[in-house]
Image (spheres, rainbow, N blue to C red):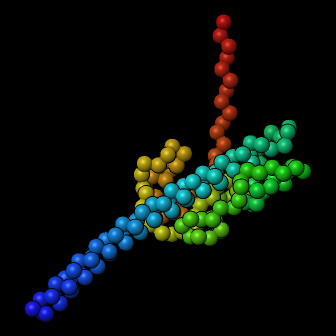
Amino acid sequence: MNGFTFLGLLMVIAIMSIGLLAVSEIWSIARKREKEQELLFVGHQFRQAIRLYCTHGPRGSQIQEYPMNLEDMLKDPRFPNMRRYLRKIYTDPITGSNEWGLMKNPNGSIYGVYSLSEDRAMKRDNFDFSDVSFKGKETYSDWKFIYTPTPAASSPKATN
């Protein structure tokens, strides 16, 4: 009888172990999806900050200037008073680092950022319109958060 009780106890432990393994796998996937969502949020913050930096230049400036470094978006050096386009330099949620890949113009100014992680992305489709270029990208480093100025819309002509 003691042998059957011992076997029964081993079976219960084995079943519980398999259940815990399945739960940990689900938790791991959920955590990775959270990090992806956070990366998308942070990337949008950087993209918006670059856009604001470019479009809020000094008065009379016809040329859009891009920031030379990420800190320029914390305090715009073109103005004597404090102008912020970013609250802080965000940490990359995938790598846990403050280091970002930078997309640079020939003059060294920044027009986009991306994660330095070569991890395989889970999300491959159903991106927002602003991130439609991420569709089918394999790694997080392929998700480039770029600000591209749109050509000024021509003003509609008045009709009589």
Near-viewer residue (10 or 143)? 10
Task: Answer with left or right where residue 16 lies relative to residue 93.
Answer: left
| Residue most extreme to the bottom | 2
Foreground of the two, 101 or 95: 95
When the figure is inspected, residue 33 is found, relative to residue 117, above or below; the finding is above
Which quadrant is home to the N terminus?
bottom left
**Which quadrant of the figure has residue 113?**
bottom right
* 76 lies left or right of 97: right
Residue 93 appears in the figure: yes
- Horizontal and vertical percent position of residue 39: 55, 59
Q: Which residue is at 84% across, 43% downward?
A: 58
Residue ID at (67%, 17%): 157
- Tell me if residue 152 comes above or below residue 16 in the rendering: above
- The residue furthest right is 80
**Which residue lies most toward the front here?**
1
Q: Residue at x 73, y 50 (%)?
A: 85
Instruction: Give the percent coordinates (x, y) of residue 18.
Output: 27, 76
Whether residue 105 appears in this view of the structure is no
Residue lying farthest to the left in this orientation: 1
Residue nearer the viewer, 140 or 92: 92
Choose top left, top right, bottom left or bottom right for residue 6: bottom left
Quadrant where the image shows the C terminus: top right
- In the rendered image, residue 42, in percent from the top left (x then y), is placed at 60, 56
Task: Give me the residue at 54% from left, 58% from top.
Answer: 38
Locate residue 106 relative to residue 10 in the image: left or right.
Answer: right
- Is 125 rendered above or below residue 34? above
Vertical order, 52 against 13 (above or below): above
Q: Is residue 76 left or right of residue 92?
A: right
Residue 71's spot in the image, x, y percent? 76, 60
Q: Quadrant of residue 152?
A: top right
